[in-house]
Amino acid sequence: MAFSNGTTKTVNQILSAAQLAGYFSQIISVDELRTFKPSPAVYAYVTRSVAAAILRFCSESTMRIASRLSLVSSFLALVTHQVAVR
């Protein structure tokens, strides 16, 4: 994640020129706030953005885990049923 006073477009250009763009999953720009670092509003904004990213990651991870557990549970139910039928 890159956090900058620059516009998203400018940050993308700089990171691309430096061959670093692939290392950043998200760019957070204060451009839309119309205020800049070191304003507390900027840090509140980036905190909300990071928190949202963490929640998305946790939600996606939870869904993947739940899906895998569901598959394991279904498999165990099938195996248990086959053993009981014998």
Image (spheres, grey):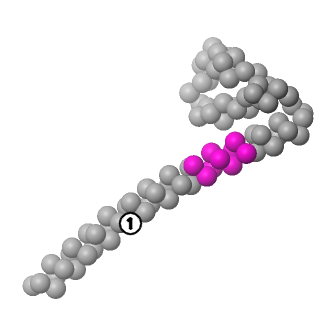
Which residue is painted at 62% across and 45% down in the image? 53
Vertical placement of 36 versus 56: above or below? above
Q: Quadrant of residue 81?
A: bottom left
The residue that mark 1 highlights is 69
- Total numbered labels placed on residues in the image: 1
What secondary structure do most residues of the magenta stretch adopt?
A: helix
Kindly identify the amino acid type of the residue bearing the numbered disc 1.
Leu
Q: Is residue 16 visible?
A: yes
Horizontal arrangement in the rendering, residue 67 relative to residue 84 (left or right): right
The answer to whether residue 4 is seen in the rendering is no
The answer to which of 12 and 17 lies nearer the viewer is 12
Determine whether the residue tagged by mark 1 lies in a helix, strand or loop. helix
Residue 26 screen position, x and y as percent = 62, 33
| Quadrant in the rendering for residue 48 | top right
In the depicted structure, whether residue 42 falls above or below residue 63: above
Is residue 32 shown left or right of residue 18? right
Q: Position of residue 20 (x, y in %)?
A: 62, 23
Q: Residue furthest left?
A: 86
Q: Is residue 72 magenta?
A: no
Residue at screen point 43% across, 63% down: 66
Residue 42: where, in percent of width, then height?
82, 36
At horizontal 32% and vertical 71% (from top left) the residue drawn is: 73
Q: Which segment is the magenta one?
A: 48-56
Q: How packed is label 1: few (under 14 Cα within 10 Å), some, or many (20 or more)?
A: few
Asked if residue 23 lies left or right of residue 60, the reply is right
Q: Quadrant of the C terminus?
A: bottom left
Where in the figure is residue 70, as x and y percent of width and height?
35, 66
